[in-house]
Image: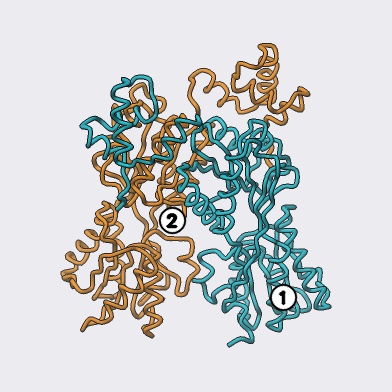
Chain colours: A cyan, B orange
Amino acid sequence: MNKKTTIYDIARALGVTVSTVSRALNNVPTISEATRKLVLDKAKELNYSVNKLASSLSSGKSNTIGVIVPTMQIHFFAEAVHSIEKELKKHNYSLLLYQSNESFEDEVNGVKTLLEAQVDGIIASLSLETQETQHFQEVINQRKCLVIFDRTHKDIPAPVVKLDDFKAGYLATQHLLEQGYKNIAFITTDKEIAIFQDRFHGFEAALKDAQISAREDFIIRGDLSIEAGIKGTEQILKSAIQPDAFIGGDDFTAVGIIQALKTANIAIPATGVIGFANQTFSSFISPTLSSIDQQANKMGEECAKLFLKMVKQKSPYEAIEQIVLDPILIKRKSTNRIDK
Amino acid sequence: MNKKTTIYDIARALGVTVSTVSRALNNVPTISEATRKLVLDKAKELNYSVNKLASSLSSGKSNTIGVIVPTMQIHFFAEAVHSIEKELKKHNYSLLLYQSNESFEDEVNGVKTLLEAQVDGIIASLSLETQETQHFQEVINQRKCLVIFDRTHKDIPAPVVKLDDFKAGYLATQHLLEQGYKNIAFITTDKEIAIFQDRFHGFEAALKDAQISAREDFIIRGDLSIEAGIKGTEQILKSAIQPDAFIGGDDFTAVGIIQALKTANIAIPATGVIGFANQTFSSFISPTLSSIDQQANKMGEECAKLFLKMVKQKSPYEAIEQIVLDPILIKRKSTNRIDK
């Protein structure tokens, strides 16, 4: 149980209602000056969220921050948000979340809704549909703090925290080559989002460095999903030559690849499979799925730190920082051809 | 790509900035009456979110609703929220999310933050820590709409949408008995949340109806997690008699049970395992995990419908509805002892 002082403790100690305490702490005018003083004194005595009180009384800020992510059903975003929350909570910020569900219009609406809700700033990762970015300019125009993470866009003049996605693609491919796989298929998205393009370029570079040329019929560009993984694999298996390894553009796609290989009675890891994003389920499925970890925790933490730094600055957009994190290769059974 | 009219389309059509359009639509006083009329006319012409415009102009409501859930990392909540979003979007509501992370104090703060953000109402599911419920009374006092779902509390005088959890526990147990399992272990939580207690009572009732008495050393009350499932199973396996089936209080716990059984070289489904909540990973793991589906989609939909009904009423709390949904048994390989 939480041992921190709550407004209930203050109410109990003073014999007043919680609503009275809440009004006093929030400076609502319907409360008498005497009661307000009583509550504030007791709050101090009981050590109630002193920082939040002090800072919101002096600054007029809401101490609320908005976070926009495509969807919390992608484990990476759920984890990053959790980490942002943890870091900002230390500084008495509350976090309001908005899911764009990969829709541009919903994302525009999210920025508007959060600004209307009087947030002090927004931390956002873009939807797959987003190509225009003027809605984020409005955040900057209002002199509120904006940080963009993971799915970024070159046109937004705001600080960025992202992964080295080229390196992520390179690492995944290099690992397959080291395990002795040579004919590597890649099932990815046709969307022009930087992170997915960068992963693919990393794949091409690793092949080039190993003096292997990619086969065009081993590359599928469509959706990222279990279904896309199944269909892509079925299509690739119709080729004259069979690949000995598959890269899924994300772990969901990789799960589809595994299912299609099982259906076709192709043994894994004799044929290797690797994904991106290191979803929770990736360590549970059979065989366990190798993947690239995107450092969600670290990314959330860096976003929160950048935001807190900006809030303190007089001109938050004076020096725009860019933080690039290293991807981490997670080796599991689905690519374990030679290590025993 | 989305074909709906956005504020960018209106701005482009009029040759003004997006910020001008936004100000005009939101009735910000710094805009001239002539410009405002121009924008509103063009918005109508292009069929831009006419309902939202009309309703927010006439009612003074924010058309924003707050949703509080313990964590979006529980698939059930992610799915329920997605379904609430989908339903409310049809009526031009925006949704702001707040995660309590199973903390009472965070939940209290969430209610406060959402009320300050001027939401028209709150849809909430309680944290594991929550025993007092006065913070929700504040929502009702402000005549805003409140709906509680899944994790409910008898002291909150608001409408409720929940699962028949007694039946969920009964169904899981009955299924095991029908598959010929007789010595059933149960690893659950020690928290006094109604849904977990009800599941357990359903388990006891199903055993009683089959004239089987539960063995006290087969019942573990602690946490719900993979680790708790592993430890609980290890402890139960030390008993003189071995159980032939295990129920996990949720699917994470059931995954732990499966891992511990594998480690002890006990074959599944010769020994059966079933969980609750039907997580995404439950159909991917090996063996696939039988579970009880909690109808997350239907639950979210019913929450949204109740909320929309309340918003239209003059006295939203006049007749307090309670909607109880049926659990659904999902049979998979982990309990498939006799069906082939």
For mark 2, name the chain: B
Q: Position of residue A253 (x, y in %)?
A: 62, 64
Q: In this view of the protein, which residue sits in the foreground, B85 or A33? A: A33
Tell me the element at label 1. Answer: helix
Residue under numbered circle 1: A174
Q: Is residue B321 visible?
A: no
B145, above or below B198, in the image: above
Mark 2 in CB contact with mark 1 (< 8 angstroms): no
Q: In this view of the protein, which residue sits in the foreground, B201 or A112? A: A112
Q: Amino acid at mark 2?
A: Ile
Q: Position of residue A101 (x, y in %)?
A: 58, 46
Q: Position of residue B332 (x, y in %)?
A: 42, 69
Q: Amino acid at mark 1?
A: Gln
Residue B265 shown left or right of residue A132 in the figure: left
For mark 1, name the chain: A
B149, above or below A338, in the image: above
Q: In this view of the protein, which residue sits in the foreground, A8 or B195? A: A8
Q: Residues within 10 Å of mark 1 (few under 14, many from 20)?
A: many
Residue at the (62%, 71%) spot, across then down: A329
A305, above or below B267, in the image: above
The quarter of the picture where residue A138 lies is: top right
Residue at the (43%, 44%) spot, across then down: B300
Residue B148 shown left or right of residue A263 in the figure: left
Q: Is residue A337 visible?
A: yes
Image quarter (top left, top right, bottom left or bottom right) of the C terminus of chain B:
bottom left
Residue A266 shown left or right of residue A93 in the figure: right
Residue under numbered circle 2: B74
Q: Marks 2/1: CA distance?
A: 34 Å
